[in-house]
Image: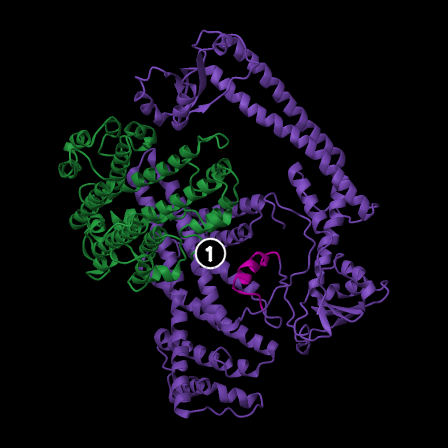
Chain colours: A green, B purple
């Protein structure tokens, strides 16, 4: 099973965008030109075959590109055994959590009805949750009741029960749902992945969780000036490379001190190797480097699969940066700085 | 080869450079080693013909004209007249191309309008009446199929009435109605659902059927306009092509010959250009400069003192010529080395023929080779023809036709044989084939060593001839050992007498062991003194061990020849067995498919194995491949369809 997944993914890797493709995309002066280049000169030809590049909407283009990733995911898992290889479904759970969070953000802003417009249509029928039914919910309670029969029922009810008559904060919901997601992934790893591969994948996810905590804490301090007591509940309860007590100290520091702590931590290599304006960019670089490492050295289906999906997601983020940059008239040099993995050997 | 030195005064430089490019192939040499001096400089500069050439290529590309050489570079026009002509032609072509583009864009849009009108056929309503509504706003267009579900969420919206016509895999053609008051809001909503509006032009009137007829008429007119514009473009090129190509040839010649500057040295008011021409062409080349004032062309012998190694141009008979590509894969021969192409050709054909012995499959190789050569001009095609022919010969010997081992039995009987002389898969046949492979390998290795000695004579390298393990002493050791083994095992003659052992084995080994000091002695150089005797002994001992091992392993390596004979026969036996088991109508299909599969797989593997034997077992004994090829400076007249200059 893993050998088939490995071979399939290695073949798909050949269709990823190269530096030359990025250079051509950076030269495009309109969304139509970008669509035209992706349609005619890259591995996105099949995904964009029916579009009219002169009239395509920016949002539709982005959605078609994301849909191509979902299609690719389905083609790969075709070679897996759904019972024995439960781990591969982490990608669907990730999408489900993202959609629930997206809806809750709209709900919190009083614009629940807008979710239906923003909802990615290509996910309908592919996830275990009914997106249309979710779009009709008008409160957190309704949502929790709707999800009762799904894996999210208990966590949503837990969130609802901890609120004051349904009044919730986005941060609280995000923390709970993302923690739930990582717990699910770890549970699936325990069941269906073994040996060194399991340890490597655990490390992969826990580093991502740690980096999430770093970014969350730094943002909370810098933009909202929150106290350490308010920041700590926002952090995920996972640890990978940082020493215990790191975050206890981290949340008490100011911006420069936080940066100094990171420069003295296991993530110092990020600061040394990449010049980013925000910590969020460092987080994306970390994910990219972890995926790249897996792709280079691993022969296990689960690791290769995770790496491939991660690298494709990075590629999609890069394309979206270019589309938005071109749409808003940014200079190519400025857009180039936002691209992850570009001109990295 | 002959070495050419062109010397002249600066004022004659342009003429000299252009004369170099006139016809006789000339391989220029970079002025290496002299540019460090303050006195000498490489002539450089921006090519003044670059822009004009770029314009020509651009004009030809846009007009779909294939650029080539028409046999002459002379034109009566001056440089200014040429530039003016090019600009004028460019403008005229651009006007026509713009017309084609505009009609193309209008055609594309109007075809979409027609698609939309076709979708409206079930709407029995006048289009004029629809669009003159003041309160109700109507929008025709298409929406991605996957967003149709989202539209359902707005079913209760009283200001939106959505009506689909038809859909394909990706899009649904539809119309929606809204009120004037809510026009902006509903348009924004539909826009966010990726609705693409298709505006029905003002000139479309009446019912959808009438509108369709009108659109067909309009499209027909546009198509005619486009056709006319294309015809005008063709007419333009019919009138101008000959003149344009002449002008292009002239500009290309001036442009490319200008590039010869980077091979030119300047010294005060003089210039120097050096390079190589073939010996037979040297006189003709030198004569080109006879009438040039202020320019001298000297023809010199290729001499190591010149500091340049002459380039090499391979020339072989037609039978062997295709194998030059294989030799150049490894590396061109040194100027003084033997050209190994004939050896490679004969040994490649022999080895491939033995390993792929089948009359029918050999014939297919020949046909495939002819096809590849005729259609794609691939050198592989010519090689396939030759190795296919030899495969057929050995197929006749082994009695195999498309895997059938009995089809040629009547032929053997007619020749007087009671049965097939060599049954490949019988135990006797197997042993014979494997033994013969080793003997063939040994013979080829000995041949390689003889070639090494010949190269030693050509290079005047006495060490290589006498004391190298691939020289005379190596032949004595290897050949003598082979003879002894053969005599002992096959004829039960014991030649391993003390004299034999000492003379044929011990002494050559000692000579090889002491190769370096002996070489110094033979070349009358200062005696070789190793830094450390124990280190010298240790190093040379292991080298000697490696040499002995390589003799053994290289010889045994040829057993793969026999192995592939057997595997080929074995695979075809399997194909025949399966065909027999399937029987009936299916048998021929199995037989054809099996043959194709074996030809494809086995053919590729055998070719690679033979190449490996050539490059590793043989070339390593006599061939350095450190030469460089003769690459004359060329004017790149031809541009391929993908824009690459050939």
**Residue at the disc numbered 1:** B353
Q: Quadrant of the N terminus of chain B?
A: bottom right
- B111 in relation to A208, above or below: above
Q: Residue at 18% x, 29% y: name it.
A: A142
* Residue B381: x %, y % from top left: 54, 50
Look at the magenta stretch and give its main secondary structure: helix
The total of numbered circles placed on residues is 1
Q: Is residue B326 magenta?
A: yes
| Subunit bearing disc 1 | B
Q: Residue at 50% x, 69% y: name it.
A: B619
Q: Residue at 33% x, 33% y: name it.
A: A120
Which residues are the magenta region? Answer: B318-333
Name the side, left or right, on which B111 lies relative to B237. Answer: left
* Residue B328: x %, y % from top left: 55, 62
Regarding residue A86, the answer to whether it shows in the image is yes
Front-most of residues B262 and B41: B41
Regarding residue B433, the answer to whether it shows in the image is no
- A305 in relation to A156, above or below: below
- B262 in relation to B202, above or below: below
Front-most of residues A81 and B613: A81
Q: Secondary structure at mark 1?
A: helix
Front-most of residues B33 and B278: B33
Front-most of residues B642 and B432: B642
Q: Is residue A208 magenta?
A: no
* Residue B490: x %, y % from top left: 36, 73
Label 1 Cα neighbours within 10 Å, binned few <14 / some 14-19 / many ≥20: many
């Amino acid at each position: 099973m893993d050998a088939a997944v490995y071979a399939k993914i290695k073949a798909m890797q050949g269709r990823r965008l190269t530096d030359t493709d990025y250079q051509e995309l950076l030269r495009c002066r309109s969304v139509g030109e970008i669509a035209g280049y992706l349609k005619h000169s890259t591995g996105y030809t099949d995904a964009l075959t029916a579009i009219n590049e002169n009239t395509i909407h920016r949002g539709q283009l982005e959605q078609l590109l994301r849909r191509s990733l979902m299609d690719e995911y389905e083609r790969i898992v075709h070679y897996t055994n759904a019972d024995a290889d439960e781990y591969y479904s982490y990608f669907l759970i990730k999408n489900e959590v993202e959609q629930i969070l997206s809806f809750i953000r709209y709900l919190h802003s009083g614009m629940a009805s807008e979710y239906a417009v923003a909802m990615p249509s290509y996910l309908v029928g592919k996830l275990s949750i009914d997106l249309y039914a979710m779009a009709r919910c008008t409160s957190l309670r309704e949502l929790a009741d709707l999800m009762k029969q799904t894996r999210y029922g208990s966590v949503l009810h837990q969130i609802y029960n901890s609120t004051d008559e349904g009044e919730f904060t986005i941060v609280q919901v995000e923390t709970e749902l993302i923690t739930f997601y990582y717990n699910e992934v770890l549970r699936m790893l325990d069941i269906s992945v073994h040996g060194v591969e399991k340890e490597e994948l655990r490390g992969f996810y826990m580093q991502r969780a740690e980096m999430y905590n770093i970014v969350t804490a730094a943002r909370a301090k810098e933009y909202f000036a929150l106290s350490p007591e308010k920041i700590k509940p926002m952090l995920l309860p996972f640890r990978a490379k940082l020493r215990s007590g790191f975050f206890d100290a981290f949340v008490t520091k100011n911006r420069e001190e936080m940066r100094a702590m990171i420069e003295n931590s296991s993530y110092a290599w990020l600061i040394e190797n990449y010049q980013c304006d925000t910590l969020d960019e460092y987080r994306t670089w970390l994910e990219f480097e972890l995926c790249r490492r897996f792709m280079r050295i691993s022969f296990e289906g689960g690791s290769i699969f995770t790496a491939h999906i991660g690298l494709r997601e990075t590629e999609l983020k890069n394309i979206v940066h270019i589309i938005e940059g071109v749409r808003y008239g940014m200079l190519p040099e400025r857009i180039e700085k936002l691209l992850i993995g570009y001109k990295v050997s | 080869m002959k070495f050419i030195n062109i010397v002249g005064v600066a004022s004659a430089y342009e003429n000299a450079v252009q004369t170099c490019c006139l016809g006789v192939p000339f391989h220029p040499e970079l002025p290496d080693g002299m540019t460090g001096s303050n006195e000498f400089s490489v002539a450089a500069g921006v090519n003044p013909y670059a822009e004009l050439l770029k314009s020509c290529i651009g004009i030809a590309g846009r007009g779909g004209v294939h650029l080539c050489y028409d046999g002459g570079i002379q034109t009566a026009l001056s440089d200014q007249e040429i530039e003016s002509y090019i600009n004028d032609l460019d403008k005229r072509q651009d006007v026509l191309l713009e017309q084609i583009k505009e009609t193309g864009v209008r055609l594309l849009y109007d075809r979409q309008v027609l698609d939309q009108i076709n979708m409206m056929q079930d709407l029995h309503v006048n289009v004029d009446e629809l669009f003159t509504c003041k309160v109700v706003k109507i929008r025709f267009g298409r929406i991605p199929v996957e967003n149709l579900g989202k539209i359902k969420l707005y079913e209760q919206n009283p200001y939106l009435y959505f009506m689909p016509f038809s859909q394909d895999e990706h899009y649904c053609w539809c119309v929606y109605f809204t009120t004037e008051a809510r026009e902006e809001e509903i348009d924004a909503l539909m826009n966010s659902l990726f609705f693409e509006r298709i505006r029905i032009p003002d000139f479309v009137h009446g019912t959808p059927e009438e509108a369709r007829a009108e659109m067909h008429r309009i499209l027909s007119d546009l198509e005619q306009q486009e056709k006319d514009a294309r015809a005008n473009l063709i007419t333009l090129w019919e009138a101008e092509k000959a003149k344009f190509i002449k002008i292009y040839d002239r500009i290309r010649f001036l442009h490319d010959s200008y590039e010869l500057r980077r091979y030119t040295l300047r010294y005060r008011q003089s210039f120097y250009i050096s390079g190589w021409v073939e010996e037979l062409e040297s006189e003709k080349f030198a004569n080109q400069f006879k009438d040039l004032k202020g320019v001298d062309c000297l023809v010199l012998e290729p001499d190591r003192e010149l500091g340049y190694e002459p380039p090499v141009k391979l020339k072989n008979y037609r039978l062997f010529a295709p194998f030059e590509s294989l030799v150049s894969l490894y590396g061109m021969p040194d100027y003084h080395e033997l050209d190994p192409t004939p050896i490679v050709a004969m040994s490649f054909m022999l080895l491939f023929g033995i390993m792929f012995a089948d009359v029918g499959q050999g014939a297919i190789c020949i046909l495939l080779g002819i096809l590849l050569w005729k259609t794609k001009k691939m050198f592989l095609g010519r090689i396939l023809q030759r190795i296919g022919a030899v495969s057929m010969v050995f197929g006749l010997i082994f009695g195999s036709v498309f895997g059938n081992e009995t089809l040629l039995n009547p032929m053997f009987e007619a020749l007087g044989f009671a049965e097939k002389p060599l049954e490949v898969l019988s135990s006797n046949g197997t042993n014979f084939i494997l033994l013969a492979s080793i003997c063939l390998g040994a013979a080829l290795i000995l041949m390689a060593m003889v070639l090494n000695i010949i190269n030693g004579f050509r290079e005047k390298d006495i060490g290589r001839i006498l004391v190298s393990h691939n020289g005379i002493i190596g032949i004595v050791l290897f050949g003598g050992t082979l003879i002894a083994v053969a005599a002992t095992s096959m004829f039960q003659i014991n030649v391993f007498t003390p004299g034999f052992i000492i003379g044929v084995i011990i002494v050559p080994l000692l000579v090889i062991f002491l190769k370096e000091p002996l070489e110094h002695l033979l070349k009358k150089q200062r005696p070789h003194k190793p830094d450390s005797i124990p280190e010298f002994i240790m190093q040379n001992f292991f080298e000697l061990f490696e040499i002995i091992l390589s003799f053994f392993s290289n010889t045994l390596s040829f057993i793969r020849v026999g192995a592939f004979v057997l595997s080929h026969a074995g695979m075809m036996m399997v194909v025949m067995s399966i065909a027999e088991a399937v029987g009936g109508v299916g048998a021929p299909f199995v037989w054809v498919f099996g043959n194709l599969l074996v030809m494809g797989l086995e053919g590729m593997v055998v070719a690679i194995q033979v190449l490996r034997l050539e490059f590793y077992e043989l070339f390593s004994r006599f061939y350095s491949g450190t030469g460089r090829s003769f690459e004359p400076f060329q004017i790149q007249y031809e541009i391929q369809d993908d824009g690459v200059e050939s």
